[in-house]
Amino acid sequence: MESLTDTPQCTIHLSDAAQERILDLRDNMHKPAMIRLYVQGGGCSGFEYKIDLAKELADDDIRVDVNPYIQLFVDPFSAPYLEGTTIDYESHTMGSRFVFHNPQAKTTCGCGSSFSVE
């Protein structure tokens, strides 16, 4: 069994705005910020981005330490689709959302929540 530190790497970046939002959510929950980031089939373009609080860790999770207060956990299936992605957070009068800037995406839907690869 591999430990999290022995698993393959995945490069994911969070903008300052995304880090601030995650830390705001963490502060309201009084817990460390452990975030599960993954893709699943669906959406307009083939794959949907998903971001949730990590409740438990799988043995094969890839851990991305963003800073001392935020850790991302990515499953091995999702890692190649998310490699090099930058996640931002936007807030407008119509709402707020995390925005994914993914170099693996060849096409994206209009709202930016799903993508396809070749």
Image (cartoon, rainbow, N blue to C red):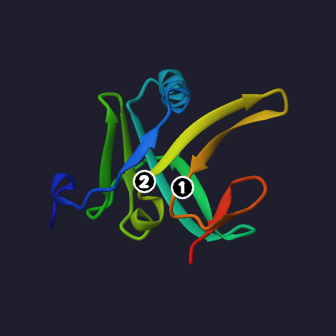
Image position, residue 11 (x, y; %) = 35, 51
Of the residues shown, which amino acid type is indicated by label 1?
Asn
Task: Between residue 114 and residue 30, name the one nearer to us.
Answer: 114
Residue that badge 1 annotates: 102
Q: Rate crowding at label 1 as few (under 14), some (14 to 19) or many (20 or more) other CA atoms within 10 Å.
A: some
Image position, residue 19 (x, y; %) = 48, 30
Q: Residue at the location (44% across, 23% down)?
A: 30
Image position, residue 86 (x, y; %) = 50, 45
Q: Residue at the location (74% across, 61% down)?
A: 109
Q: Rate crowding at label 2 as few (under 14), some (14 to 19) or many (20 or more) other CA atoms within 10 Å.
A: some
Where is 29 relative to 117, above or below? Answer: above
Q: Are marks 1 and 2 in contact (CB under 8 Å)?
A: yes
Give me the C-alpha separation between circle 1 and circle 2.
7 Å
Q: Is residue 114 left or right of residue 83?
A: right
How many circles with numbers are drawn on the protein?
2
Q: Is residue 77 left or right of residue 101?
A: left
List the single residue furthest toward the right. Answer: 94
Q: In terms of secondary structure, where does tag 1 sit?
A: loop
Q: In terms of secondary structure, where does tag 2 sit?
A: loop
Q: Residue at the location (49% across, 27% down)?
A: 16
Task: Between residue 54 and residue 99, name the one nearer to us.
Answer: 99
Image position, residue 48 (x, y; %) = 63, 63
Q: Residue at the location (71% across, 67% down)?
A: 43
Question: Of the numbered discs in the image, which one, if any, rests on residue 84?
Answer: 2
N-term-proximal mark, 1 vs 2: 2
Of the residues shown, which amino acid type is indicated by label 2?
Gly
Query: Quarter-wise, where is residue 69 in the image?
Result: top left
Q: Is residue 10 left or right of residue 88?
A: left
Which quarter of the figure is the N terminus placed in?
bottom left
Where is 106 relative to 31, above or below? Answer: below
